[in-house]
Amino acid sequence: MGRIFSGVLLALFASFTAAQNQVNMSPGVTEIGADIFELHMLIMWICVVIGVAVFAVMFYSIYAHRKSRGHEASQFHESTKVEIAWTVVPFLILIGMAVPATSTLLEVYDNDEAELDVLITGHQWKWKYEYLDETGENISFFSNLTTPQEEIYNTEAKGDHYLLEVDEPLVIPTNTKVRFLITANDVIHSWWVPELAVKRDAIPGFINEAWTRVPQEGIYRGQCTELCGAYHGFMPVVVHAVSPEEFQAWQAAKRGAAQAESQLAMQTLSADELMAQGKAVYETSCGACHGAQGEGGIGNAIAGSSVVMGDLSQHMAIVAKGVAGTAMQAFDAQLNEVELAAVLTYQRNAFGNNTGDIVQPGDVTGMSNG
Amino acid sequence: MGDHQHGPAKGMLRWLYTTNHKDIGTLYLWFSFAMFLLGGFFAMVIRAELFQPGMQLVEPAFFNQMTTLHGLVMVFGAIMPSFVGLANWLIPMMIGAPDMALPRMNNWSFWILPPAFLMLASTLFMEGGAPAFGWTFYAPLSTTYAPPSVTFFIFAIHILGVSSIMGSINIIATVMNMRAPGMTYMKMPMFVWTWLITAFLLVAVMPVLAGAVTMMLMDIHFGTSFFSAAGGGDPVLFQHIFWFFGHPEVYIIILPAFGVVSQIIPAFSRKPLFGYASMVYATASIAFLSFVVWAHHMYTVGMPVAGELFFMYATMLIAVPTGVKVFNWISTMWRGSLSFETPMLFSIGFLVLFTLGGFTGLMLSIAPADFQYHDTYFVVAHFHYVMVAGAVFSMTAAIYYWLPKWCGRMYSESMGKIHFWISFIGFNITFFPQHFVGLAGMPRRIPDYALQFADFNMMSSIGAFIYGASQLLFLYNVIATIVSGERVSDEKVWDGAEGLEWTVPTPAPYHTFEEPPLVSKPAGTF
């Protein structure tokens, strides 16, 4: 008992001395975020004032009208006037709250005249970002958690951005109205960045809209906020806001890289190259379900699997198209030919599978849309 | 008719065959307490995993099974049956009826519950694990992507829906037909009123829940696509149906709690309930409004702005009748002659903490602000303030208040007070910091979290262990009272208690009011 109590005191002490413990909503960096924050504070303070007034009356009564002080009970038990008063006054206060709430809500819903459209698709358990471009040359990529399993399972010290770090963040230009078109591939997810005050559910079969205009450069982090399965807690959102010039340069670089990759897909790669890239792809796309050592978990074991060690076309079909009704997704939408070839090669040779099969990007052409 | 004075049958089969409202009430209460401990155990697993960042004790998939079962067991196994048990014990005694109107159905509506929960709990041992999609079971996570055990979950929900509907029909039939002469509707004790309204809510919405799970069953096994966009269905439809059940459901849980507090506060203020009529109207208004606010759980699904505005305004309106209730309770205390036995302490705890949960509810009703609150720990804090400090505190107050009447023995007052203070402090250490982490951006239903949430989560876990442990003290106190508590024989156990249940001998005999009493005074008059 004493130890628990001192533990509580310690936790309390730690909580209120450590500066990083945020106790309130962040006003964020956008205009809407600031409006929402003000609304939140306004309503909170109204509640605090009402609460203090009401409980002051109650605690006074508890102090002054106690039997132990010999207080005799009055027998009054109704008053229509008072009842009307405490029905009408709260109603008026509510109207006072509804006015600013309505105007902020209308602002949030003003999706018109966006300068840039980004399609956001929730997958179990990663986000896909696609920049919609009139020329049809869309940039698209997946954004995967990069926190290593060793940090999650406490064998290594946790980094500063534990669980809130990704391999490729969403990059958007500052001072530009960016519209997000949000949907999902499998189950419902929800895309949230607290500092941009944007939260919208990603629903399969629906496209929801949201928007932001970020005035300052920076890195903004959030998370999926709708339970979406086992790794719901492991699909962060990271947004880099950069200057419009930098954004142009980034877009050009991404297009260049996409071209280089499609050329790579026509080449023949060495076993070492495939294994090295395959290991990286395995760790971001497969390891969470199939185990870091291919031992299995939510998914079947890869080590010694009859699928992986059996017929290549069947193995390829499962990886590319998924297995309906299970958590095994269709990876042709997520990985390009080189990545698919690499991960197939890796699975067929790692974890003691040693089939010696080498899968080249050319072998998987036609399976991939990535 | 036989012997009027006969007592209960002998042996264990008494409990299986009983049609006596007091026996069935006792069964419900013990069953719900067992479920409370089971759901509490799941909560302890959750809080132990969240004690520190990183995965320590369980895997993420199992963590989701724990949050799902914790919610389901607490809502459907602990809170709802406990109030049905209370209704069984008290409604006949409060309205001067000899028993419930439909005693055989009463037996049946209890006895189908344990198999339903046994089946639900057994999913933990099935291949693929227990349901892991949250107690709100949103499709398609609960259909296309669900573990095979979902079919057992659906069957369990169906059974407990049937149980709730039968229980409610029984309460409606009893209150409407079996009131003693002179017991007009506007003389009924508040507890009876709140349960009558709750029973109507249950009859209205449990079939909707049954419809939702049946549609899931069809989607999973019979190739329909109610909730699958790929087949032309609509995953958001599921949420509309679920919350059309789910919002009235939260009032189903809280209205009987209001009723309990409306009995206890006047008793320990030695003063009649202030504004009885307005309490009845406020309860009815809350019940009505509960049908038109469901989509405030869904502000982020992308509803048209007109829909958002409607649900925002309707939700804000609920603050008015709820406020009336709080003001009435405080006016009841005002210039009374207050004493602070354990039931009163829990009622005051209810009043303060429920109001706090009401305030955060008002904040959540503001749609644009909800975009920041939605699905964070702020919501978790909010609904535990209304569900635990609301419903559970009020239920605890009810047990302390009526237990001496039921068993003719007094509980240990000092142990009761210790139980209250440990519960009160433990509860707040658990849930108050959750407001902070929620506002700072921690989503709910995650097994692991970013480092800036670590301190408050540790605090929350410590509080949860304290709160959990205090319930064992409660269990001990109740058992000790029944076995060896000090005997009481006053009909009125509490000097301020009013109502027909306090006119029968203590302990309440197996059969009461075989001859109806004549009621002339209004409810709660001194």
Image: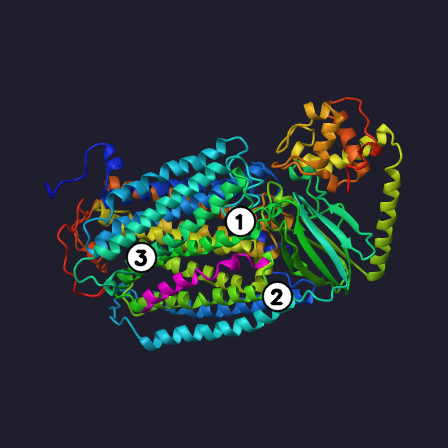
Q: Nearer the viewer, mark 2 or mark 1?
A: 2
SS of the residue at dot 1?
helix
Residue bearing mark 2: A36
The CA span between labels 2 and 1 is 28 Å
According to the image, label 1 marks what residue? B459
- Viewer can see residue A23: no
Query: Bounds of the magenta span?
Result: B278-300
Horizontally, is B149 left or right of B326 in the view? right
Residue in front for this viewpoint, A220 or B133: B133
- Is B43 within the magenta? no
Pointer 3 and pointer 1 on the same chain? yes
Counting from the top left corner in percent of width and height, residue A188 is at: 61, 48
Chain ID, mark 3: B
- Numbered circles on residues, count: 3
- Tell me what residue is drawn at x 77 percent, y 65 percent: A175
Residue B509 pos. (x, y %):
17, 46
> Label 3: which residue?
B196
Image quarter hosting the C terminus of chain A: top right
- Label 3 CA crowd tier, 10 Å (few <14, some 14–19, many 20+): many
Residue type, label 3? Leu
For label 1, count other residues whose C-alpha is less than 10 Å away and answer few (under 14), some (14-19) or many (20+).
many
